[in-house]
Image (cartoon, grey):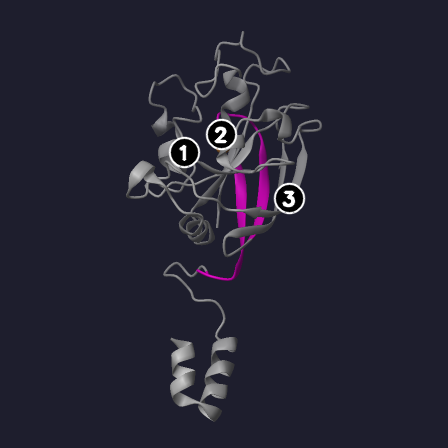
Amino acid sequence: MRRNSKLVLGGAAAAVLTAVSMGAGPVLAQNGKATDKSVTLTAALAELNGSGASGTATAVVKNQKIEHIEVHAAGLTPDAPHAQHIHYGNEALNECPTLALDSNGDGRLTTVEGVPAYGPVVVSLNTTGDTTPASFLDVARFPVSQGGVFNYSRDNIEFTDVAGTGYPGAGGLGTAKQIADSIRAGEGVLVIHGLDYDGDGTYSFSDPEGGSELTPGLPAEATDPAVCGVLR
Ligand SMILES: [Cu+2]
């Protein structure tokens, strides 16, 4: 549109238009978040499942890329790996879950039970390598809390197309742009997983929670959500 206007108007009028468009800043969506360019999102991370953990997260997102993200958390299961993700679903509530979603009434929220609130994984916030949902439980590449604390940061994470995110069409595929636009609009939810319900110092299959609903290879304690916050 702008290019066409310049062609028609030419000369001085084009210079004015250029000056105006350069100064106009990002386009704002209805909720006031920028729909383009760079936005800084923050999340206050609150405990789930009585974990006692808390933290903060900050993400700078430009177009389809997370230029920088950091997560600071404390009160986590000490010296244990903690899977962490950005969750998002086109049909999710885009909120942190409450026990109202405890569908089997056992008093704890599993990762799957929380999906109606926060949606599926769209980014794996690990320390090295692939950051797509394919890495969502590659525990060896997630941060390990030191005495219950971790300070995580990573740069230049690209959003990718993700199936199962609830968009119309085959497989509910969301494009990288659709997902990034929604995250920038404040609909992404950051979740850190892993908590030691019984305080025995380890994630264990022999604890009452047993195995994870997500994978037979991990105890439920390793995958249940421990803290959650909406990136706004
Ligand atoms: Cu997660």
Mark toward the start of the polypeptide (3 vs 1): 1
Q: CA distance from mark 2 to mark 3?
A: 24 Å
User: Are there few (<14), some (14-19), or many (20+) residues within 10 Å of tag 1?
Assistant: many
Instruction: For residue 168, say whether it is visible.
Output: yes
Picture coordinates of residue 8, whole percent (x, y) = 38, 87
Q: Which residue is mark 3?
A: 154
Locate residue 28 relative to residue 70 in the image: left or right.
left
User: Quadrant of the image for the N terminus?
Assistant: bottom left
Q: Is residue 159 part of the magenta span, yes or no?
A: no
Instruction: For residue 47, say whether it is visible.
Output: no
Locate residue 128 relative to residue 218 in the image: left or right.
right
Image mark for residue 161: none
Q: Which residue is mark 2?
A: 48
Q: Residue furthest right?
A: 146
Magenta highlight range: 34-60
Q: How many marks?
A: 3
User: Which residue is painted at 38% across and 26% down in the image?
Assistant: 113
Looking at the rendered structure, the kind of residue marked 1 is Pro
User: Are there few (<14), some (14-19), or many (20+) residues within 10 Å of tag 3?
Assistant: some
Mark toward the start of the polypeptide (2 vs 3): 2
Picture coordinates of residue 210, whole percent (x, y) = 48, 11
Q: Which residue is more in the foreground, 16 or 144?
A: 16
Q: Which residue is mark 1?
A: 97
* Residue 73: quarter of image: top right
Picture coordinates of residue 160, whole percent (x, y) = 48, 44
Magenta: predominant secondary structure element? strand
Depth check, mark 3 against mark 1: the one in front is 3
User: Which residue is painted at 52% across and 76% down in the image?
Assistant: 22
Q: Check if mark 2's residue and mark 1's residue have beta carbons within 8 Å.
A: yes
Mark toward the start of the polypeptide (2 vs 1): 2
Picture coordinates of residue 215, whole percent (x, y) = 47, 18
